Image: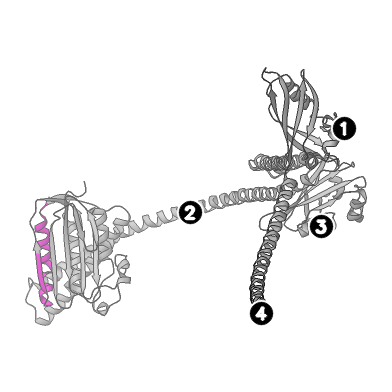
């Protein structure tokens, strides 16, 4: 039994141990898993750190490589340099290492450009004497032989006793800035050159003088002693215009001075708008061919077309050299730039010369036309004089017998010499009306002639406007009543008016007669009175007036279409209407009325009208006759 108990106890212990081992194994596996995850995270973090470090190293290396400056330090004892150290950046700037400078103390001064060494020595002497030295810009020779620009900024250091013990400095590579400054300076000089050439030539108006000045300036730009300018004629040939040196004999015949572009050295230049640059004797001879008779010793030849903004070639600028020296390409490009302005100047001078020529021709034609006009005016004045004599004669010759006809017809019609039957009275009435109408037409023609000749007679006098209006209305009242028209008169009394009473009556009768002629039904209104304020509205027009009277005649007749309104006051104008065949007239009534109102009465006349609804004529005249 004891043995069994021992066996059971051992089995129990074994089972318990197995359970603890299992639990311990599970715990261990869990810890291994967690540690594995931690290690994976640490590995990932380390890789990320390594990547960031590499990127940082790359940026730092690029930054260091981009640095165009470095520092140096000079130890000083008793006012003399005793040792110099250069930072590692000196390699990027000078090409030499710090070890190179340490091995050769005089290397730095040897690197300085010989033209700048004195300034560098003076800067060092100023520092060694214990003074501040301003930054110095100078040139050095790089190790590879290139010339570089640097800026040296020294800073002195003093001990407690105020004695100079050292000075540090910063060397900066400023080559790019210096090159940019040089480029800007050169560009500005070129702009000034262009401006100088254009300004010097813009005030010149003689073609040869302009070309001589242009040739002189361009030769100075490129540093050549010979040149020429050829102008393109209208027929396409080149005309030799300006030259300096022996250039005239290179491509042109001295006897004629002309050659066609297709037969000379410049055919491509003037034909294709492209410059020609020949840099050797062989190129000049090869390009010139058989046409080159006198240019065997030409070593350099440049031809530039003078092309306007409209792509028209007006000439060729040529520059020559008989020695091996050639102008730099930049100078040639500057000349090419100038040629565009030269072409414009040349075109302007040509236009000016053509303008002078046209002006001279025009002046001659003007003189000829002026003489012709003077002769025509003399003839017209003679015709006008004859016309005036004719009208004066006819006014007497026509009106005298016509007045006799009218007078005798009136006597017969009034039966002063005996009784008449009804048929005789009717015929005599027709004769009397026709005579009076003819007399009215003759008077209108005579008045128009006098007005146009400036010989209208004005007889001013004081009268009451009310009486004139009343008399005019009375004259046409019978005609108005016979046509069955209503008559409205608003004739306001006012103080005495100073005018030509007969001319005012004539104008008013003309307006009333027209109103009666062209009104078949409705009414005719006459309004006269003083304009009550300084601002009077007449129809659609607004007239500022003071001391004026207004007379308006309005009807309900056929009216006038809008397009015909501007023509209504023209002489011998009658507007087409259905009443025209039945209404007689010459078309002078309204023309004469407007002339009398504006020139004799010194007023204005306005018209508002609408087809089918009538017209309204308004006369506005000054009270004192405009005196």
Residue that mark 4 sits on: 2
Residue that mark 1 sits on: 103
C-alpha gap between disc 4 and disc 2: 169 Å
* Residue at 13% from the left image edge and 68% from the top image edge: 525
Q: Closer to the observer: label 2 or label 3?
A: 3
Q: Closer to the observer: label 2 or label 1?
A: 1
Residue that mark 3 sits on: 267
Image: 334 above or below 129: below
Q: Give the range drawn in magenta.
A: 463-489
Residue that mark 2 sits on: 373
User: How busy is the neighbourhood of tag 2: few (under 14 within 10 Å), some, or many (20 plus)?
Assistant: some
Residue 126 image offset from top left, x and y in percent: 73, 21
Image: 20 above or below 346: below
User: How busy is the neighbourhood of tag 4: few (under 14 within 10 Å), some, or many (20 plus)?
Assistant: few
State yes or no: residue 113 in magenta. Answer: no
C-alpha gap between disc 2 and disc 3: 52 Å
Q: Closer to the observer: label 1 or label 3?
A: 1
Sooner in the amino-acid sequence: mark 4 or mark 2: 4
Image: 442 above or below 145: below
Sooner in the amino-acid sequence: mark 4 or mark 3: 4
What SS does tag 2 mark?
helix
Q: In the displayed structure, does residue 329 sit left or right of residue 374?
A: right
Q: In the displayed structure, does residue 563 sit left or right of residue 270?
A: left
Residue 341 image offset from top left, x and y in percent: 68, 48
Sooner in the amino-acid sequence: mark 1 or mark 4: 4
Q: Is the magenta stretch mostly helix, strand or loop?
A: helix
* Label 4–label 3 contact, CB within 8 A: no
Sooner in the amino-acid sequence: mark 2 or mark 3: 3
């Amino acid at each position: 039994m004891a043995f069994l108990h021992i066996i059971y106890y051992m089995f129990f212990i074994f089972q318990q141990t197995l359970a603890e081992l299992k639990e311990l194994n599970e715990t261990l596996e869990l810890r291994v898993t967690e540690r594995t995850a931690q290690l994976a995270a640490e590995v990932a973090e380390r890789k990320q750190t390594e990547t960031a470090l590499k990127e940082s190293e790359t940026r730092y290396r690029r930054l260091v490589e981009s640095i165009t400056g470095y520092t140096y330090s000079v130890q000083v004892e008793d006012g003399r340099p005793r040792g110099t150290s250069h930072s590692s950046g000196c390699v990027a700037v000078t090409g030499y290492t710090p070890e190179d400078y340490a091995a050769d103390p005089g290397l730095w001064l040897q690197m300085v450009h010989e033209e700048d060494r004195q300034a560098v020595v003076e800067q060092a002497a100023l520092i060694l004497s214990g003074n501040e030295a301003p930054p110095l810009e100078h040139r050095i020779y790089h190790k590879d032989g290139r010339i570089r620009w640097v800026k040296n900024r020294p800073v002195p250091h003093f001990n407690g006793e105020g004695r100079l013990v050292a000075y540090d400095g910063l060397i900066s590579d400023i080559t790019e800035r210096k090159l940019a400054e040089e480029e800007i300076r050169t560009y500005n000089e070129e702009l000034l050159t262009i401006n100088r050439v254009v300004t010097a030539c813009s005030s010149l108006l003689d073609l040869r003088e302009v070309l001589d000045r242009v040739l002189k300036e361009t030769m100075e730009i490129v540093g050549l002693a010979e040149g020429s300018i050829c102008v393109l004629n209208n027929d396409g040939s080149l005309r030799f215009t300006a030259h300096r040196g022996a250039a005239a004999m290179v491509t042109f015949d001295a006897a004629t001075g002309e050659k066609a572009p297709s037969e000379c050295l410049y055919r491509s230049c003037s034909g294709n708008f492209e410059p020609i640059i020949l840099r050797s004797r062989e190129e000049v001879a090869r390009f010139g061919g058989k046409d080159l008779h006198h240019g065997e010793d030409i070593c350099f030849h440049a031809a530039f077309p003078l092309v306007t903004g409209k792509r028209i070639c007006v000439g060729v600028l040529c520059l020559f050299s008989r020695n091996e020296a050639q102008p730099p390409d930049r100078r040639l490009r500057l000349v090419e730039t100038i040629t565009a302005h030269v072409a414009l100047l040349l075109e302007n001078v040509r236009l000016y010369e053509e303008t002078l020529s046209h002006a001279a021709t025009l002046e001659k034609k003007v003189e000829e036309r002026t003489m012709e006009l003077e002769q025509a005016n003399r003839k017209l004045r003679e015709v006008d004089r004859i016309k005036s004599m004719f009208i004066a004669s006819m006014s007497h010759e026509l009106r005298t017998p016509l007045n006799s006809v009218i007078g005798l017809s009136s006597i017969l019609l009034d039966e002063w010499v005996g009784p008449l039957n009804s048929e005789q009275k009717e015929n005599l009435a027709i004769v009397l009306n026709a005579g009076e109408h003819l007399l009215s037409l003759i008077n209108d023609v005579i008045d128009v002639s006098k007005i146009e000749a400036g010989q209208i007679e004005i007889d001013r006098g004081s009268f009451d406007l009310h009486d004139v209006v009343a008399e005019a209305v009375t004259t046409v009242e019978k005609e108005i009543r016979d046509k069955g028209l209503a008559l409205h008169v608003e004739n306001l009394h006012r103080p005495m008016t100073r005018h030509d009473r007969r001319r005012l009556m004539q104008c008013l009768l003309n307006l009333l007669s027209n109103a009666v002629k062209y009104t078949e039904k409705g009414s005719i209104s006459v309004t006269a009175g003083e304009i009550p304020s300084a601002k009077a509205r007449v129809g659609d027009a607004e007239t500022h007036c003071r001391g004026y009277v207004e007379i308006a005649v309005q009807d309900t007749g056929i009216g006038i279409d809008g397009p015909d309104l501007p023509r209504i006051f023209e002489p011998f104008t009658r507007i087409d209407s259905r009443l025209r065949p039945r209404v007689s007239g010459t078309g002078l009534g309204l023309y004469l009325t407007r002339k009398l109102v504006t020139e004799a009465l010194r007023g204005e006349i306005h018209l508002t009208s609408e087809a089918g609804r009538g017209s309204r004529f308004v006369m506005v005249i000054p009270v004192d006759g405009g005196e």
